[in-house]
Image (tube, rainbow, N blue to C red):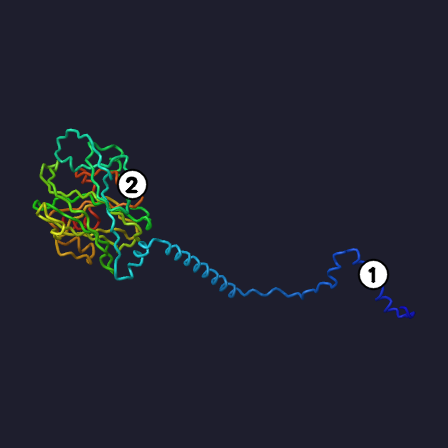
Amino acid sequence: MQSGGHDASIITRYSDLEYNLSAYEDYPWTKDYPEPLKQVQYQSERHIDPITEGLKLANEQNQRLQNELHEMHKKFDTLSARTKQLELSVSTNGMPNSIDKYDRYLPPKAITYERSVRENKNDQFDQHEHSQQKSLNTLDKRITHASPAPSISTSNINKLRNPLAPQSYDPVGGFIIFFDFIANLPSTIQQCCLITSIHHPKSGLGEPSQLQPLKCEQYIDGKNDEPMNIALIATKQPVPGCPPQQALTIVIEVQTSTNKKASSEELQTNAWTKLALFDNKNRLYSGRWKVPLKALPIRQDESLAVISRAPTFGRAELYYRLVNSQDGDDQSDAPLSLKHRDHYAYPLQVCLLIVINNM
């Protein structure tokens, strides 16, 4: 241009550049970006293969399930060592001790009551919880006693009438078994003692737990005025962290002696029984039950159906209650008396055998 050029195309291009530069001068922010942005080449949308997309969704679903399973394993690991040991007991050779804690469900402190005059001479066997009793510490193995109460409140009678129907089971809280009493023991027996063990067909018997030896007493049946040799157990055993498995049972060994002053080492095993815990829906067999004691030998590996047909130990029967852990405090307040033994029922296996024998 300085040399006086007259090329029309150059002059036109120069004019366009000059115009564009003057337009950018109105926007100061363009000084930091001297070069224009590069346009990205347009790419058409990729065709979605339904098979590939389905596999992708399946992989995502599988990953989600694996994450949930991992979370479940983490929760399992946070359970107590006791619970974890019980869960793994199916695949191990040693059954952990699941009933190593027991306690009397009578008040921790002896309470003095005023006795009312009664015609029944068996009031010593009518036990009642004090209304102000606090929940017992399940980690304490104390055995506590209390004097009998003169009367039974209406609220406790309602607890006695509670059907204790099966309900959803909390494996962390577990269950509680109340050993109430043994009725119709042979008259020669002066002492007895229970030894309890959890049993599973694959892992066998767990570590046994021995309850305190008991003195047997004579009880006059108010219905027929016949004497009855009984043992008032009044002991509960909490079993926390027990998995709901229908194969799990409790084996009860009953040691006895005809000597009232015999030591616990002198007691000998003379009877036993086996208790069901869970039904086929993994619900606890909660309720008030009575089972006949069986004569020796102990056959803990036999099924409940086979055991129900085994010879009995005379007419002796064990009366007990099986409840969920959340019902433990409420059942500790329920009245305990041989007068109310009609509220206890035979388990299904025993009932079926009775029906068959009567046919």
Q: Secondary structure at mark 2?
A: loop
Relative to 172, 187 lies left or right: left
Relative to 207, 34 lies left or right: right
In the rendered image, residue 241, in percent from the top left (x then y), is placed at 31, 51
Q: Which comes before the other along the chain, label 1 or label 2? A: 1
Say how many tags the image has.
2
Q: Is residue 327 above or below residue 81?
A: above
Task: Give me the residue at 24% from left, 41% from top.
Answer: 105
* Residue that badge 2 annotates: 135
Relative to 42, 210 lies left or right: left
Q: Secondary structure at mark 1?
A: helix
In the rendered image, residue 335, in percent from the top left (x then y), is placed at 22, 37
Using the image as rendered, state which of residue 8 and residue 235 is in the foreground.
235
Residue found at the very far right of the displayed protein: 4
Q: Quadrant of residue 142?
A: top left
Relative to 25, 235 lies left or right: left
Looking at the figure, which quarter contains the N terminus?
A: bottom right
Q: Residues within 10 Å of mark 1 (few under 14, many from 20)?
A: few
Three-letter residue code for mark 1: Tyr
Q: Is residue 45 above or below residue 108?
A: below
* Residue that badge 1 annotates: 19
Spatial CA span between label 1 and label 2: 94 Å
Task: Give me the residue at 19% from left, 57% from top.
Answer: 300
Using the image as rendered, state which of residue 64 and residue 33 is in the foreground.
33
Using the image as rendered, state which of residue 93 and residue 309 is in the foreground.
93
Q: Is residue 20 above or below residue 153?
A: below
Q: Residues within 10 Å of mark 2 (few under 14, many from 20)?
A: few
Q: Are marks 1 and 2 in contact (CB under 8 Å)?
A: no
Three-letter residue code for mark 2: Ser
In the rendered image, residue 162, in percent from the top left (x then y), is placed at 27, 39
In the rendered image, residue 359, in percent from the top left (x then y), is placed at 14, 49
Front: mark 1 or 2: 2
